[in-house]
Image (tube, coloured by chain):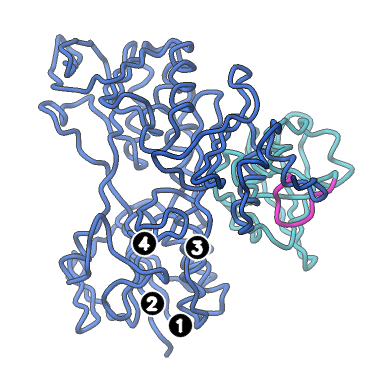
Amino acid sequence: MGEHILIIGGGQSAVQLADSLRSEGFAGKLTLISQDTELPYQRPPLSKDFMAEGAAPELLPLRAESFYEQQDIDLIRATRVEMVDPRARIVHLHDGRQLGYDKLVFATGARNRPLPCPGGDLEGVHGLRDAADAHALHAALPGARRVVVIGAGFIGLEFAAAARARGIEVTVLEFAPRPMGRAVSAPLSGWFTKAHLAAGIQLRLEEGVAEIAEHSGGLQVLSSTGNSYLADLVVYGVGVLPNAELAEAAGVPVDNGITVDEQLRTGLEGIYALGDCANFPSVHCGSSIRLESVQNATDQARTLARILTGQPQPYRMLPWFWSTQGSIRLQIAGLAAPGDEPVVLGDLSSGRFSIALLREGVLVAVESVNRPADHIAARKLLSGGQRITADRLEGITSLKELSAPMAPVA
Amino acid sequence: MPTIIYSQPDGTSTEVEVADGGNVMRAAVNEGIAGIVGECGGQAMCATCHVYVDPQDAASLSPVEDDEDEMLDCTTAERTEFSRLGCQVKLGGPVQRLRVSIPSDQV
């Protein structure tokens, strides 16, 4: 009987890790403990396909049910881990069962930050993170004429664009001065503000939510600037909180998520963390960071699978992200930071362009709107380890020109 | 029902029935066909559902749109004139039987 690796979680990083462990040749016992009753499923379609008109689409599984059996992965569903005992190397489940392990991985993800205002838990106020949220919203949308979205981040704007496309009156409240301010450059925020306003979305900046109240069968949202909006439905997306409490209770060091090193090891021997819940040192931003993305979840899983099968290596993959807002496809390669210098490649007014971000004269990130080729070129350039300096961006309209094999080097 | 035949690099193949409107990625993921990942959930963002469609079937499919075309430039296995992203290839209508080959690598 070989080693037992126990993974707590049923999301993208958990399932990818189990898959990659088997493909890396791990032959021991492998257990996944998921809180969800559903077969582990993909989340990206929830804020996109599920919000379109028509019958609710079926959940897209991460792997077919047969996969777990074929790969000899014990998937335990609808089960919560109550406590981890790292000294005895045992986890206690909510139903009283105990499972021993040799190595433990926290792939516990994140949860919606609750709306911190009176009325944030009223009926008709929805988050959008899991399958139950998506089904509830899909069912509520046909009856909605007016919706208020709280938070102009990726999730809020993806939902706002989808609701607007159905002809619903949409107001978005954002307390910050620009949308997606945590994730994208100022010129890109500005471009998105105009695009959403042009689509008929009332995007209200520097205006947060103060209170939500019931109002003649619907809801009334009072804003921080004293405005009042009637809504049949309120959707909030104001960030997430890492699910780190279980780890913390077990004595694992925690700081904005579960603290890990470059090899995804926590401070306790034999315990690892990855995905949305893990705060790791990133060479791409020069500090510790927690990333909530499919890329981060899957690439960390593939790296950890190699680490756990005797191939130690640091996690240094290039971060990339995407968001689909109505007909706008945003793709981001690399990690930008406040203060990076934006250089627009192409024409903002054409609706197809990229914004290169330079730090001390060197390319660190690229934001592409409806220009997948630029995004792919950016991923290759930024992963390749070569320094792309500002002078090489002069006079080009697409990054493709730089990644072409015979591109002249200035 | 429309049928997709998936051929693996080792020569084995699997036949899968799909509903009208179903796509090559979704059917593969649902059935556990090895070698089709669909990491982005069918958003044409990750190019991990790359397939080669049978040359005889290629013309009957909906044409490659710009987004798919650009993403196909970043597949791990070599792109050919028969390369498609499985998430963008729908079955139904004139497309009742489709043969696709799965490349050796997706990531």
- Quote the CA–CA distance across marks 3 and 2: 23 Å
Mark toward the viewer: 2 or 4: 4
Whole-percent x, y for residue A13 in the image = 43, 59
Does label 2 or label 1 sit earlier along the sequence?
Answer: 2
Discs 2, 4 touching: Cβ within 8 Å? no
Q: Which residues are magenta?
A: B73-80
Q: Chain of mark 4?
A: A
Give the chain letter for blue: A
Is disc 4 surrounded by few (<14), some (14 to 19) or many (20+) residues within 10 Å? many
Which mark is on residue A187?
none
- How far, Cα to Cα, is label 2 from label 4? 21 Å
The verdict on a common chain for dots 2 and 4 is: yes
Q: Residues within 10 Å of mark 1 (few under 14, many from 20)?
A: some
Query: Contact (CB < 8 A) between labels 2 and 1?
Result: yes
Q: Give the position of the C terminus of chain A as an image quadrant.
A: top right
* Mark before the other along the chain sequence, 2 or 4: 2
Tag 1, which chain?
A
| 3 or 4: tag closer to the N-terminus | 4
Q: Residue A371 in the image: x percent, y percent?
A: 64, 32
Q: Which is the main secondary structure of the residues drawn in magenta?
A: loop
Q: CA distance from mark 1 to mark 3?
A: 27 Å
The image's mark for residue A5 is: 2
- From this view, report whether residue A53 is shown above or below residue B74: above
Residue B31 picture quarter: bottom right
Which structural element holds mark 3?
loop
Residue highlighted by disc 3: A316
